[in-house]
Amino acid sequence: MPPSFLVASPSPCFVLFPKRPCGFLSPNKTLLPLKLRKATLILRASKGESPNWSQWLPAESLSADKLFRLIAGATASPIGQFVSSPTTFLHSIDPRVKLVWLLALVVLPARSHIIMRFGLVIYLTVLSVWVLPKNAWMDQLGRVYLLSGLLFLTLGLGSDGVPALVQLRTPPPAMMGLPSLPVSLTGYSYVIMKLGPLTFTRKGLSVASTVACLTFTVFQSASLCLTTTTPEQLASALRWFMLPLRYFGVSVSEIVLTLLLSLRFITLVFDEVRNIALGIVSRRVNWKQLTVMETIDVFFNYFRCIFKNIFSHAEQISQAMIVRGFKGDGGTHKIYFLSESSFGMKDLICLLCLTVVIGAALLSEYYLV
């Protein structure tokens, strides 16, 4: 039998009003005496265990093992890494032409018609499928399309979803004796679609398409440029464009050296993130036996190992540069580029195509309504 506690308490009337007699009022408003009795309060201990809040969490969908597998798979594709095979025509294009194309693709989505924006997205999609290996373009396009789609829906429904309350300063035409304005015969409608309290308008479509297409073109064009161009070629092309800045006191050599080290360091970061995640997955940890705090501790150790290994690689790179004669002055340190850039017929054709694309983007603002 569970333990019971007996607590005696006086009448509620005596507790609330100790100086007044206790009793019931009859219909004649006479006080009827009431016998005071001891009230018995029984408190019993619960047989079951206290509820655990962690049981309400969706353990299968928020599994740490699935999260680490997702991290290991997300970095499996060559993000920002040069892919030497299969060799395509984009590998042979001069890196200076690629940088010009990259700059144009960043600016054009914001200064062109919506049809031109989606045309650039389709063009980059076809080029990625043609140039990149199958496992690379499927992984990259899936994630970039997911991010762009979320931005499109969020901004499209949120930019002009709640219209501003505007009060007219003039009376309506009916009160002034003027005829009402006729309805447009062209079928123009500012509201495109209405989903309950959310409204998808033409302003929302313009903002959402601009941001989504700009995000897609920036990420995918940069990925194509890094995948088909070595870091040395990109550093050499940037140095060629920045050489006139030396007359204004800009340290071009130091900037180029920093860019070259950064491009080399990107691959090390992704490799460390993937390798440590694979190491945790390969140990087959039984996550069901771990508590919430122990799982959080594993994640803290994961991030700690990432930063520790990254700082260790940075120290090794600095020591290797000192051994090779680097004394902290980027101007006196000679950078050896493995290949020299050459301008050919393919590069001229790419520049002509870029001129056509820029002209079409500028004309789309005036002729496409």
Image (cartoon, rainbow, N blue to C red):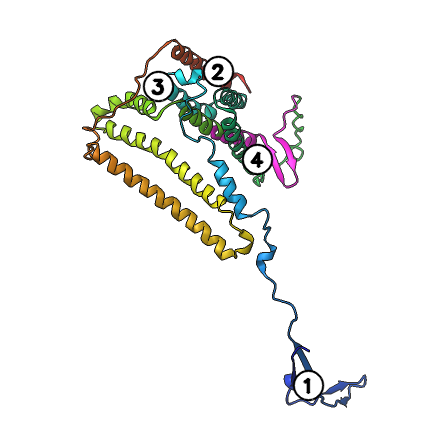
- The answer to which image quadrant residue 338 occupies is top left
* Amino acid type shown at disc 3: Arg
Residue 96's disc number:
3
- The answer to which image quadrant residue 186 occupies is top right
Residue 153's disc number:
4
* Amino acid type shown at disc 1: Ser
Say what secondary structure mark 3 lies in. helix
Instruction: Identify residue for label 1.
Output: 11
* Amino acid type shown at disc 4: Leu
The alpha-carbon separation of the residues under discs 4 and 1 comes to 64 Å
Whether the magenta-drawn stretch holds residue 214 is answered as yes
Instruction: Identify residue for label 2.
Output: 360
**Residue 230 appears at what percent x and percent y?**
36, 24
Residue closest to the eye, 239 or 52: 52
Q: Is residue 131 left or right of residue 315?
A: right
Magenta-drawn segment: 186-215
Marks 4 & 2, CB-CB < 8 Å contact = no
Above or below for 269 versus 228:
below
Which mark lies nearer to you, 1 or 3? 3
Q: Residues within 10 Å of mark 3 (few under 14, many from 20)?
A: many
**Residue 77 appears at what percent x and percent y?**
47, 31
User: Residue at the location (53% across, 28% down)?
Assistant: 138
Taking the view exactly as shown, the residue that stands out farthest to the right is: 27
User: Residue at the location (51% across, 26% down)?
Assistant: 137
The alpha-carbon separation of the residues under discs 4 and 2 comes to 27 Å
Instruction: First in sequence, mark 4 or 2: give its number.
Output: 4
